[in-house]
Amino acid sequence: MMVTLCSTYSIDYSDIISIAALIVSLILFPVSFMISKRQANNRKIKDSLMDDVSDIRKDYRNMLNSLFGGKLQNQYVISWFKIANIKLNSINTFTNSKFKKCSSLKAMRIGDGMRLELTESDEFIKSYKDSKSIISLGAQTKTSIESRYAELNDEFLKMINEINYY
């Protein structure tokens, strides 16, 4: 069917449908672009946070390998735990504001427990008393700290999973 607007112009219904489709496309394109951009930005934030958690996880592993190998000084260990706690606190503050559910508080508690266990161990105290800066840990202390590290490692993996799915 054809609609005549004036003597020189005529429009088919198919033309009206094409014009309507063009108008709808022009309206929906910016909306879909904004949604896509928001999703890409959220993905970048999540990837960055997951990388940060993964880096802290690696830092703990490297520090413990050096500690168990008798390569670390007591003052370094104390400052290292302070820095690790600051990093975890920073991640916790951001993830709580952005994702609400993800929290690094449990990881911070486990890390604090590990620090306390280490710094209150007989070997650590002896390294201070003897003015010996290198820490040499016994088998029992190593086993206990390894157990806490396994728990901490699980918590880091949970954090990465929570960040990824929120």
Image (cartoon, rainbow, N blue to C red):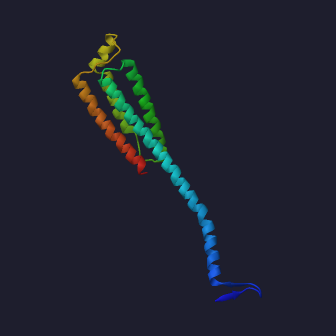
Q: Is residue 31 toward the left or the right of residue 124 in the image?
A: right
Q: Is residue 92 toward the left or the right of residue 37 in the image?
A: left
| Residue farthest front in this picture | 8
Spot occupied by residue 55 in the image (x, y as percentages of width and height): 41, 36
Q: Is residue 136 above or below residue 59?
A: above
Residue at x-position 38% and y-position 34%: 58
Residue at x-position 35% and y-position 44%: 158
Residue at x-position 57% and y-position 59%: 33
Locate residue 75: give its quadrant.
Answer: top left
Spot occupied by residue 66 in the image (x, y as percentages of width and height): 34, 25
Q: Is residue 69 above or below residue 35?
A: above
| Residue farthest left in this picture | 140
Residue 61 visible: yes
Residue at x-position 54% and y-position 57%: 36
Residue 101 visible: no
Q: Nearer the viewer, residue 62 or 35?
A: 62
Total numbered labels: 0
Q: Is residue 139 toward the left or the right of residue 38 in the image?
A: left
| Residue farthest right in this picture | 7
Q: Nearer the viewer, residue 103 or 13?
A: 13
Spot occupied by residue 166 in the image (x, y as percentages of width and height): 43, 51
Q: Is residue 12 above or below residue 98?
A: below
Spot occupied by residue 95 in the image (x, y as percentages of width and height): 46, 43
Quadrant location of the N terminus?
bottom right
Locate residue 14: give its quadrant.
Answer: bottom right
Q: Is residue 149 above or below residue 71?
A: below
